[in-house]
Amino acid sequence: MAHFTPETFNDSLLGMLLGRTEQLKNRILDKHLEPQGVTAQQFKVLIMIARFNAETPADLCRMLSLDSGSMTRMLDRLEQKDLLTRKRSEADRRQVRLVLTQAGQALSDLLPQIGARAMNEMVGVLEESELTTLERLLTKILIASADPITLARIAAQ
């Protein structure tokens, strides 16, 4: 269904609102994660490994829409912080597997509490029904675009 035309496109704030909301989420996450010494971007990598079974840098690149150079730098930083290690696959020595260290696992165990506080700060202005509607609408958009993370989450429910 086409909601926009070239003539009406400038009247819509949807794209800007979605982008600004993502920036707000990252700022709030950064603030809540500061005591742990990680950023919102690093948080997303740890969540994808711990919760969404990302096993390789390629998995993370696909899930987070990052290029391999950016991902390599991100993984380097997380490795320097002793939160993960990269190990060669025994089945295919060309492949690298990502494994959380003991410190990385301990931090990933805290991520739901940290994430919940940050998300509550961000969406605390919404009524419960508004939040449910927002999540339903965003899920609908992502399912229609065949987003693999959303589809996997729906399939697991």
Image (cartoon, rainbow, N blue to C red):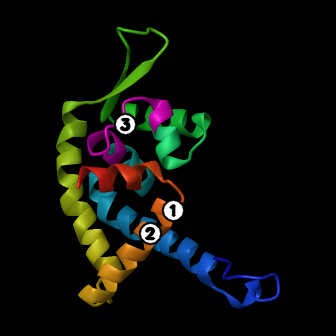
The residue mark sitting in front, 1 or 3, is 1
Q: Which mark is residue 60?
A: none
Residue at point 61%, 40% (across, down): 67
| Magenta region | 47-59
Give, as a three-letter code, the residue at label 3: Ala
Q: Quadrant of residue 75?
A: top left
Q: Give whichever of 18, 116 is nearer the camera.
A: 18
User: In this image, 19 relative to 5: left or right?
Assistant: left
Name above or below for residue 15 compared with residue 91: below
Name above or below for residue 27 compared with residue 67: below
C-alpha gap between disc 3 and disc 2: 23 Å
C-alpha gap between disc 1 and disc 2: 6 Å
Query: Magenta segment: does it hold 48?
Result: yes
- The residue that label 2 is drawn on is 140
The residue mark sitting in front, 3 or 2, is 2
Give, as a three-letter code, the residue at label 1: Ala
Few, some or many residues within 10 Å of mark 2 (<14, 14–19, 20+): few
Q: Earlier in the sequence, mark 3 or mark 2?
A: 3
Give, as a three-letter code, the residue at label 2: Lys
C-alpha gap between disc 1 and disc 3: 23 Å
Residue 38 visible from this viewpoint: no
Rendering coords of residue 41 (x, y %): 44, 52
Q: Which mark is residue 54?
A: 3
Q: Earlier in the sequence, mark 1 or mark 3?
A: 3
Is mark 1 in CB contact (under 8 Å) with mark 2? yes
Secondary structure, mark 1, is helix
- The residue that label 1 is drawn on is 144
